[in-house]
Image (tube, grey):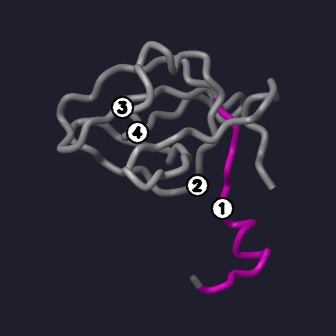
Amino acid sequence: MSQISYLDFEKVDIRVGKVIKAEEFTKTRKPAYKLWIDFGDLGIKKSSAQITKLYQHEDLVNKLILAVTNFPPRQIADFMSEVLVLGVVLDDGDVVLIQPDREVPLGKRIL
C-alpha cells in the first residue's frame, strides 16, 4: 500500500458507538446483521455488518464499537447502511470487532 499523509487520515471520521439493537439480516447474499448504533450527539446510525461467525446478534447489544461515520450511505437489499463498523479480518474471513478497552463517551472521535 502507498503511504498517506496525516491530513489524509484526518479525513476519515472514526467514532465510538454503542450497539442498541441488532437483528439478523436475511436478505443479504452473505450472512450479516442489521445494527442500530448510538453515536451520542451524532445520533443513531444503521449498519449492515458481516460479523455472524463470531458474534450472536443478541450479544452485540450494549457493545462498544468503532465505525467510520463519514462514508456515503449504501443501500444493502432493503436496508440503508450509514456507517462502516470496523473489525480485524482474520485469515479465514472471520471478523473480530475493534472496540475501546473501557467505557468512553459515545461519539468521541478516534485519532
Residue 34 is left or right of residue 25, and the answer is right
How crowded pointer 2 is (Cα within 10 Å; few <14, some 14-19, many 20+) is rated as some
For mark 3, give the secondary structure: loop
Q: Nearer the viewer, mark 1 or mark 2?
A: 1
Residues at marks 1 and 3, CA–CA distance in whole angstroms: 26 Å
Q: Which residues are magenta?
A: 2-17
Residues at marks 2 and 3, CA–CA distance in whole angstroms: 24 Å
Q: Earlier in the sequence, mark 1 or mark 3?
A: 1
- Indicate which disc residue 49 carries: 4
Residue 41 coordinates in the image, percent (x, y): 72, 31
Q: Earlier in the sequence, mark 4 or mark 2?
A: 4
- Give the vertical position of 50 relative to 9 (above or below): above
Q: Nearer the viewer, mark 4 or mark 1?
A: 4
Residue 105 coordinates in the image, percent (x, y): 81, 28
Q: Amino acid at mark 2?
A: Asn
How crowded pointer 3 is (Cα within 10 Å; few <14, some 14-19, many 20+) is rated as some
Q: Amino acid at mark 1?
A: Val
Question: Are circles 1 and 2 on residues that touch, CB within 8 Å?
Answer: yes
Q: Earlier in the sequence, mark 2 or mark 3?
A: 3
Residues at marks 4 and 1, CA–CA distance in whole angstroms: 19 Å
Q: Amino acid at mark 3?
A: Thr
- Indicate which disc residue 12 carries: 1
- Give the vertical position of 102 relative to 2 (above or below): above
Q: Quadrant of the C terminus?
A: bottom right
Identified at 41% across, 36% down, the residue is 51
- Indicate which disc residue 52 carries: 3
How crowded pointer 4 is (Cα within 10 Å; few <14, some 14-19, many 20+) is rated as many
